[in-house]
Amino acid sequence: MSDSSPPRSPGPTLKRPVFLLVALALTMLFGAAGWMSGCQTIEEYRTPADAFEHQIEVLPTAEDRDTARASYEKYQGTMETAKVRQYPFGVAEFLLGAAMLALTARTFGGRAGARSMLLQVTAAQAILLVVAYFVTRDAREAWLVHIGVTVSMMSPPDSVERLLWRPGMVTAVASSVWSTWIFVRTLLSAMAIVLLTRKQTTAFTDAGEPVSER
């Protein structure tokens, strides 16, 4: 006897919750930032030491060139000393950033298990940034001073940049901004983690149902 029961209608599609979209926007931003920061750190140690010499030669006066060269040599010395700490952090930033980008895309598509892995990577990246902030402080301050000197020397003699730059001022101001950013960045990471654990988010990512773009 044939089965005369009507065919079952497909289950309703699930709409991506707003909490999930906000969380994924944050993790996409964090992933891209970490990936680029890691690339920059790795490239810093792969760039030939004489690459900066071409920039020095365009400075207008011999005094400016000597000041910029001395700043760069001091910066290079600090970076070389910090390499055993700085380079591994750069590689870790690169890998975690790439993983966050991939897992964000998978979570957006509702792939099973992607959300829980994204939670772990997001927490790991936040911890990494805080640890790196304290462990690589000397390298960061050397970079800030070098950037301040370079901007000052490459500016016209009567410019605002020349007037405002003073030894230690760039480090003090930039370090305050950096500290504030680390604090805000940690709060945003915590917010992303909370949003990824909301009931609406877990219902979507763990349901395995078709996704609605509406």
Image (cartoon, rainbow, N blue to C red):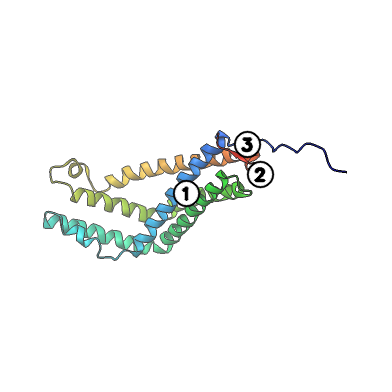
Q: Quadrant of residue 60?
A: bottom left
Q: Position of residue 213 (x, y in %)?
A: 55, 37
User: Which residue ends up furthest to the left in the rendered image?
Assistant: 61
Q: Is residue 119 left or right of residue 35?
A: right
Which one is earlier in the sequence, the residue at label 3 or at label 2? 3
* Amino acid type shown at disc 3: Leu
* Amino acid type shown at disc 2: Gly
Gap in angstroms between the C-alphas marked 1 and 3 = 26 Å
The quarter in which the C terminus is drawn is: top right
Gap in angstroms between the C-alphas marked 3 and 2 = 9 Å
Q: Position of residue 52 (x, y in %)?
A: 24, 60
Gap in angstroms between the C-alphas marked 1 and 2 = 25 Å
**Front position among marks 1 and 3:** 3
Residue 31 image label: 1
Q: Quadrant of residue 179?
A: top left
Where is mark 2, residue-wise? 208
Q: Residue at x 63, y 36 (%)?
A: 14
Q: Is residue 137 left or right of residue 201?
A: left
Where is mark 3, residue-wise? 14
Q: Position of residue 181 (x, y in %)?
A: 41, 42
The quarter in which the N terminus is drawn is: top right
* Amino acid type shown at disc 1: Gly
